[in-house]
Image: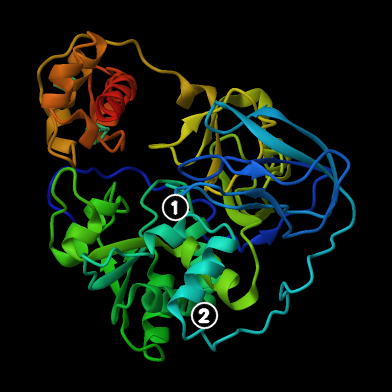
Amino acid sequence: LKTFRKGGLHQEQNKRSADRAIEVFPLPETVSVPLSQALGAAATPVVEKGDRVLCGQLIGKSDTFISAQVHSPVSGTVTRIEEIDDVSGFKRKAVIIRVEGDEYLPGIDLSPEISREIPADREEILQRIHDCGIVGLGGATFPSHIKLSIPANKKVEVLLINGAECEPYLTCDHRLMLERSEELMIGIQIMMKALAVQKAVIAVESNKKDAVALLTKLCNEYTGISVVTLKVKYPQGAEKQLIKAVTGRAVPSGMLPMDVGAVVHNVGTAVAVYEAVQKNKPLISRVVTVSGSSISNPSNYLVRIGTPINLLLEKAGWDAASTGKIVAGGPMMGKALSNTSVPVVKGLSGILAFAHAESMRPAVQNCIRCARCVKVCPMGLSPYYLEAVSAADKLDLAEQAHAMDCMECGCCQYICPSRRPLLDQIRMGKSKLGHLIRSRKNN
Ligand code: SF4
Ligand code: SF4
């Protein structure tokens, strides 16, 4: 089995919802659709209070290069455009829509038939992906049309499809690989055409044997696509670690995957690309795993964007009284939520509710110089040192120690026997350092 060499760790997988088929989540009464759901600038609203909208209608236009279109996930009436809390903890401008019926914009193909004839023109493919607001669904939310547009001076040889799903608990990608496998394969073909590559590899961790078997069989029908089985190891699904595991190539600090001839997209993104290009369907829903020790009925829901997450928790048998922490995303890279009425967004893969006992942080002890944090860091950093210089605001030292290479995987904080808040401090240091680097560039 393939894997990356440097760092990483093994945790309890707790994939409690792995055998739960994707369930269509009921329409809520109201949705709140943030205009900023992609990496980059927020979209500009193109609707006003009182407007009637249909499912799939454009409500937020992307005006800048790195940004993504936003569409109405429901039919109904716009009641407000206002700032709301979102899953990241920041205030975001959002379009609030009262749901009325479930009427789609004409031209969106809702038939279950698989559409196999892919467009011949690369520009047309990229335009449809842009128009449908597709972003990376693995969590990064980078606009997909940009990631599929390779500059003329770069050469990409292989498309890697990330089906590792290495975070414990999350199973939305696993279910997509099982239940939408043909759409996934056609989505991959479309991406291969956009990138002008002849080779694609679907990388799946070995704990998803059924998905490996199914996709390997399907590969016989699709030229140039193969499946690689990966060792179960966190963070196997991180871009640089995935490239290393599958191709053996290392992406140097400050460089991009395309610099070593690879582009990585998530399985959910490939299915969304299929829907955009073959069905003209914008990204208005996604699969979300709801799990954790305070959830009695772990589930995978196909949910409209903008649905309040407390509805998902309640449907999955949430025991609110026993809950000590709710996390948006996986337990390693997700963020704790203080507000359960925040809406589902394009980048939300899971909602996890944990009991009090699992949520408490033990008291922080002094660093004992055991170097375990160094050993597990997949980026070869010295987390104990980055923590210290970040806490002391010594940004020059943090920069010299490559703080910006930290991908916030959380391995260091997880392993530390002194329970030091390594990632918390490094994140704060990175945020300040990022501002400093950007202001330096602008001057
Ligand atoms: S793992 Fe914790 S205790 Fe050990 S060196 Fe790192 S910060 Fe110090
Ligand atoms: S969070 Fe950053 S410093 Fe810590 S192990 Fe991951 S990459 Fe290394």
Depth check: 161 or 323 in front? 161
Residue 362: x and y in percent read 36, 15
Q: Amino acid at mark 2?
A: Glu
Residue 273: x and y in percent read 52, 68
Residue on which disc 1 sits: 138
Q: Please, what secondary structure does the residue beneath circle 2 have? A: helix
98 horizontally vs 276: left or right: right
Q: Residue at 27% across / 45% down in the picture?
A: 10
Q: Amino acid at mark 1?
A: Gly
292 horizontally vs 363: left or right: right
Q: Is residue 216 above or below residue 256?
A: below
Residue 1 seen in the current view:
no
Q: Residue at 17% across / 40% down in the picture?
A: 379
Residue 357 seen in the current view:
yes
Residue on which disc 2 sits: 182
Q: Please, what secondary structure does the residue beneath circle 1 have? A: loop
Q: CA distance from mark 1 to mark 2?
A: 19 Å
